[in-house]
Image (cartoon, grey):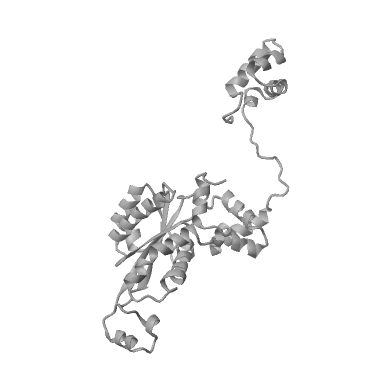
Amino acid sequence: MSHRNARLTVYGRRLLVQRVTAGRPVAHVAAEMGVSRATAHKWVRRYRLEGEHGLHDRSSRPRHCPRRTTAEAESAILALRRSRRLGPARIAGILGLHASTVHRVLTRHHERARPGELVHVDVKKLGRIRDGGGWRAHGRDSPQRHAARRAPRAGYDYVHCAIDDHTRLAYAEIHPDETATTCADFLRRAAQALAAHGIPAIERVMTDNAMAYRRSRAFAHALTDIGATHRLTRAYRPQTNGKAERFNRTLTEEWAYAHTFTSSKQRADTLPDFLHTYNHHRAHTALAGQPPITRVNNASGQYS
């Protein structure tokens, strides 16, 4: 397809050739069409050599690219990606390549080239914190610790997470369970939250094989509502959902266990601030040291 400022479309080129082949001088026809004589001669020559096909645009891709990454290197990159789910920076360090080179190879092989193409969804289970704090606040041998052992179990909080594969943008909520209805409602809100950050549509959702995802009508209806298809991870292969697993690790190290909380509510109240820092300020190794929001902005054309 011609670019938007092109003087000649395929129709214009055909008209130029028709006028020249009818016997009119090339220079006169070029002036009428608003192009140079060299351009006019080019299209006439292509028509005489290739016929109608010669009037169409050719690919700008070079015939030869001697500096392109070798097939052996590409195979090694893809093998590490599939077996260990590593990002461009880690793969580059192992193979002695530039991270930008690895990223181009992954993009060329359809490794999530755009926001919303694949969103990972998972649940991280955290033990609830009794009011006043647990052993992290008082110590393992404290009276509070021994009293807690004799008391009924505090139970768990379930952190539902959604991470965009391409941008690493994340959204999370805390719920008292991981039932099918909770998972379904979370997915709808996650889609809305990602849209508010500049990812308007989710194409595919990846989850593990939990019953709430695999056999739930509620979750299936939520997928239909947001217009996404569903993909399950391979059984006993958590690395397939590697983006979610890595986010869960960051979640625990930099939020859940990074501070001494005196209640589950206090911990929950800090989750929005953690997510804002993660999405807007925290440097991400897989994004060349940039936070996830920069890749969303670049994809939407806000940054060059």
In the displayed structure, 131 sits above or below 8; it is below
Residue 121 is left or right of residue 4, and the answer is left
Residue 297 location (% of width, % of height): 50, 49
Residue 293 is left or right of residue 141, and the answer is right
Residue 279 location (% of width, % of height): 47, 58
State the residue at coordinates (62%, 23%): 52
Residue 18 location (% of width, % of height): 64, 14
Residue 24 is left or right of residue 166, and the answer is right
State the residue in front, 281 or 22: 281
Q: Quadrant of residue 43?
A: top right
Q: Quadrant of residue 251?
A: bottom left
Residue 238 in sight? no
Residue 278 in sight? yes
Residue furthest to the left in view is: 152
State the residue in front, 40 or 82: 40
Instruction: Work out which quarter of the rendered image holds the N terminus and state it.
Output: top right
In the displayed structure, 61 sits above or below 77; it is above
State the residue at coordinates (68%, 52%): 69
Q: How many marks?
A: 0
State the residue at coordinates (55%, 64%): 84
State the residue in front, 201 or 137: 137
Residue 250 location (% of width, % of height): 47, 67
Q: Quadrant of residue 130?
A: bottom left
Instruction: Work out which quarter of the rendered image holds the C terminus and state it.
Output: top right
